[in-house]
């Protein structure tokens, strides 16, 4: 009945044929019900009648006046109608460009209700953009009218009529899925009232309360869904935890050249505690660039290995895979742990040998790219999956991994901090650990800005660092000139810089070089055989060379905030004072100025992430691959954090009492979850 009507195509409405249905489709309206959720961008205030004398000062308004006479004036070879109107306060002119027919509709003496934007021009009060109608007997001002987003071929009037039709049908008596107790404590109007109110509010205040109700509801069900899946994970997939058979951690920790920071200890404890639970871990570890997440990950892996499980560390690039494999090998060199590197570039026989060893359980830790999870790789006893730089992987990739067999523990690591509001949504079904302090002894990186054309000073500065025995990165947005004319590029600048810095050596790394060549260059840079590394943003992720103290990013205006902060994080990893020089080319867009300003003023990844969210919005920040399911109709997580926390509090209380939502007052909520789920899987297809 009602529900099916809302699901019906718009063509089932009177006045909507295929053409209009197509136009509605452009506004995202594909069902009758979608019309109910069409959000007005603003309201026209037709709640009171404005005296003509002050209409111009008012701007947009409703007036009631009588037609005094018609006049015509020449314009572009034609005659244009002017309708002179007056009320008790004064007179005004309606300029009817292309609408001379109105002379017939509104003869002198007509009483009119006019809504328009008025201004004072040519010595009179004028409106050339107006709607007028004859005053009907006893007619009251219509109130606040919704202004909907339009597309060519549709008018406000058409949309208003369609929405009114749907609102008037019994189908608009929508059931409210929110538990009544919450509505009461939060002072929320019912769902049906809220929908009605956003289209026809009695006041702007009522409209605001209706929007708040809709935002709350949306966040409530989004969070309820996350909370339920976290609960189901804890409950259903019980697995036996093998007991410890090897003792490795203590020895490894003793052999480290430093001790863990307090934050590292804390997050490691959180992770290990999870790993002892009978359900699979799902935890996000975030922290600033250089905060030491890799070591935590490796110690977590060690914990799995101690009880005879295999661990994998998955990273987005082969460069990073090799680096982490080196790090792991170095840290674990005193033990009998077997570490292997799995990358797409390996030769077939080597790959087969690796596969066999993994399947036989001879390898304890595999570090690699997504090649780790190609269909032919079978793990003897996979206990822990760590995904570094998780933002480079999609949700579906993550899910595919988790669905491989034994429900292993999952540790997601983020390249940079994630703002709290994003963590609570994009990772709302995960537990979250954060490293908020860098290892001791780090000197904050000094960031400077330089206009392109002033780089001789920059080069002199880098030269001094080289003379002091340090190393430097130069980063460019493009590999070579092809396609990106006018930009400096890595290939071109590598030659120029090689000449400039001779006898110091210069190497190049970008994605068009083959893996072996790039790996060799990186290794030489790491060992200090190459002094200056010229690269594209391939060095963005994770590369760790503590002796490099300078990074020069040219065309900094073209990089995103998160990328710039990641790039800057390539330096400042050791005991030496480090420098980041952002070379920009003018003219700068407002956004680019804003990004450079944020970066210049702050070294704090948590702050920068918040700013990035503010400037770019959640979709862009997460990357297109993850943004899809964060599309809200009403809510905006940048604004609605308080509402979201509120919703989460209520949800925790509800699930404590009624985890399966079987109580009568929770049944509509349970039904709403099921409905949303099937809608989502429909959209997936
Ligand atoms: P990120 O969090 O960006 O992945 P890394 O794990 O690459 O950071 O660590 C950055 C650097 O800090 C590495 O050189 C690492 O050896 C070093 N490091 C990690 N933990 C500590 C510590 N507790 N004390 C000193 N240095 C540390
Ligand atoms: Mg890292």
Image (cartoon, helix red, strand yellow):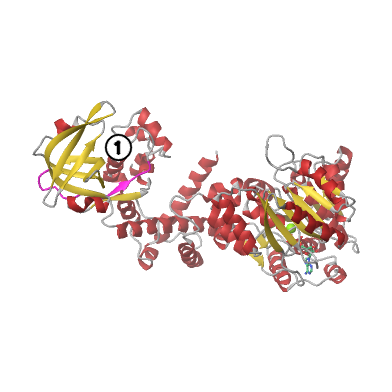
Query: Quarter of the image containing the C terminus?
Result: top right
Q: Can residue 409 be seen?
A: no
User: Looking at the image, how many numbered discs can be counted on the residues?
Assistant: 1
Query: Quarter of the image containing the N terminus?
Result: top left
- Is the residue 97 above or below the residue 346 in the image? above
Residue drawn at x 33%, y 43% as measured from the top left: 2
Q: Quadrant of ligand 1?
A: bottom right
Which residue position holds label 1?
158
Tell me: 484 left or right of 549.
left
Residue 249: image location, x then y, percent? 83, 68
Residue drawn at x 81%, y 47% as measured from the top left: 497
Q: Secondary structure at mark 1?
A: helix
Q: Quadrant of residue 131?
A: top left
> How many residues crowd around disc 1 within 10 Å: few (fewer than 14), some, or many (20 or more)?
some
Q: Which of the pair 666/294 is nearer the observer?
A: 294
Residue 93 on the magenta segment: no
The answer to whether the residue bearing label 1 lies less than 8 angstroms from the nearest atom of ligand 2 is no
Per the rendered image, the range of residues in magenta is 135-149
Q: Which of the pair 461/330 is nearer the observer?
A: 461
Residue 527: image location, x then y, percent? 89, 56
Residue 104: image location, x then y, percent? 14, 30
Residue drawn at x 22%, y 53% as measured from the top left: 47
Tell me: 410 left or right of 225.
right
Residue 303: image location, x then y, percent? 78, 64
Residue 136 on the magenta segment: yes
Dominant secondary structure, magenta: loop
Q: Can residue 592 be seen?
A: yes
Tell me: 9 left or right of 458.
left
Q: Which residue in the rendered view is the most extreme toward the left?
A: 109
């Amino acid at each position: 009945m009602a529900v099916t009507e809302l699901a019906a195509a718009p063509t089932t409405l009177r006045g909507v044929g295929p053409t209009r249905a197509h136009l509605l489709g452009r506004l995202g309206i594909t069902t009758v019900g979608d019309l109910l959720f069409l959000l007005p961008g603003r309201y026209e205030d037709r709640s009171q009648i404005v005296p003509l004398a002050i209409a111009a000062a008012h701007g947009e308004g409703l007036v009631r006046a009588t037609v005094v006479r018609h006049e015509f004036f020449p314009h572009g070879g034609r005659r244009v109608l002017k309708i002179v109107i007056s009320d008790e306060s004064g007179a005004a002119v309606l300029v009817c460009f292309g609408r001379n027919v109105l002379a017939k509709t509104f003869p002198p003496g007509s009483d009119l209700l006019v809504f328009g934007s008025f201004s004072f021009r040519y010595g009179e009060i004028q409106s050339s953009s107006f709607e007028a109608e004859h005053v009907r007997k006893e007619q009251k001002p219509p109130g606040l009218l919704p202004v909907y987003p339009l597309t060519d071929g549709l008018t406000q009037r058409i949309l208003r009529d369609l929405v009114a039709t749907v609102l008037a049908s019994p189908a608009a008596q929508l059931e409210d899925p929110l538990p009544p107790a919450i509505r009461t404590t939060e002072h929320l109007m019912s769902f049906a009232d809220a929908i009605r109110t956003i289209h026809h509010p009695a006041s702007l205040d009522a409209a605001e309360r209706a929007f708040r109700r809709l935002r709350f509801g949306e966040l409530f069900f989004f969070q309820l869904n996350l909370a339920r899946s976290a609960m189901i994970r804890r409950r259903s997939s019980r697995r036996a935890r093998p007991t410890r058979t090897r003792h490795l951690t203590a020895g490894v920790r003793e052999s480290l050249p430093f001790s863990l920071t307090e934050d590292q200890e804390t997050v490691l404890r959180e992770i290990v505690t999870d790993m002892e639970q009978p359900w699979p871990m799902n935890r996000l570890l975030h922290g600033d660039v250089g905060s030491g997440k890799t070591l935590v990950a490796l110690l977590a892996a060690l914990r799995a290995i101690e009880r005879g499980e295999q661990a994998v560390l998955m990273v987005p690039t082969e460069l990073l895979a090799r680096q982490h494999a080196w790090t792991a090998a170095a840290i674990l060199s005193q033990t009998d742990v077997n570490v292997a590197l799995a990358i797409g570039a390996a030769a077939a026989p080597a790959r087969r040998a690796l596969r066999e060893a993994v399947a036989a359980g001879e390898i304890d830790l595999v570090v690699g790219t997504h090649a780790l999870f190609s269909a032919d790789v079978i793990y003897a006893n996979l206990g822990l999956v760590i995904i570094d730089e998780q933002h480079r992987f999609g949700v579906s990739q993550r899910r595919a991994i988790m669905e491989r067999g034994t429900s292993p523990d999952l540790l997601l690591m983020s390249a940079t901090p994630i703002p709290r509001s994003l963590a609570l949504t994009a990772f709302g079904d995960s537990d979250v650990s954060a490293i908020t302090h860098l290892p001791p002894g780090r000197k904050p990186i000094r960031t400077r800005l330089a206009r392109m054309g002033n780089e001789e000073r920059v080069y002199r500065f880098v030269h001094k660092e080289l003379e002091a025995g340090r190393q430097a990165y130069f980063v460019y947005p493009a590999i070579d000139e092809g396609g990106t004319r006018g930009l400096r590029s890595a290939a071109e600048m590598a030659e120029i810089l090689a000449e400039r810095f001779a006898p110091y050596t210069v190497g190049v790394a970008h994605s068009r070089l083959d893996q072996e060549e790039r790996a060799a260059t990186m290794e030489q840079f790491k060992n200090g055989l190459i002094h200056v590394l010229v690269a594209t943003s391939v060095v963005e992720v994770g590369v760790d060379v503590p002796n490099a103290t300078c990074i020069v990013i040219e065309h900094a205006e073209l990089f995103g905030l998160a990328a710039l902060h990641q790039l800057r994080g390539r330096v400042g990893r050791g005991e030496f004072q480090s420098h980041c020089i952002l070379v920009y080319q003018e003219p700068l867009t407002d956004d680019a100025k804003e990004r450079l300003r944020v970066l210049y003023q702050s070294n704090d990844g948590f702050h920068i992430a918040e700013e990035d969210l503010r400037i770019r919005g959640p979709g862009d920040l997460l990357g297109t691959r993850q943004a899809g399911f964060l599309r809200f109709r009403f809510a905006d997580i940048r604004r609605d954090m308080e509402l979201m926390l509120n919703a989460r509090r209520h949800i925790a209380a509800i699930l404590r009492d009624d985890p399966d939502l079987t109580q009568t007052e929770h049944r509509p909520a349970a039904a709403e979850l099921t409905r949303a789920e099937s809608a989502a899987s429909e959209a997936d297809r």
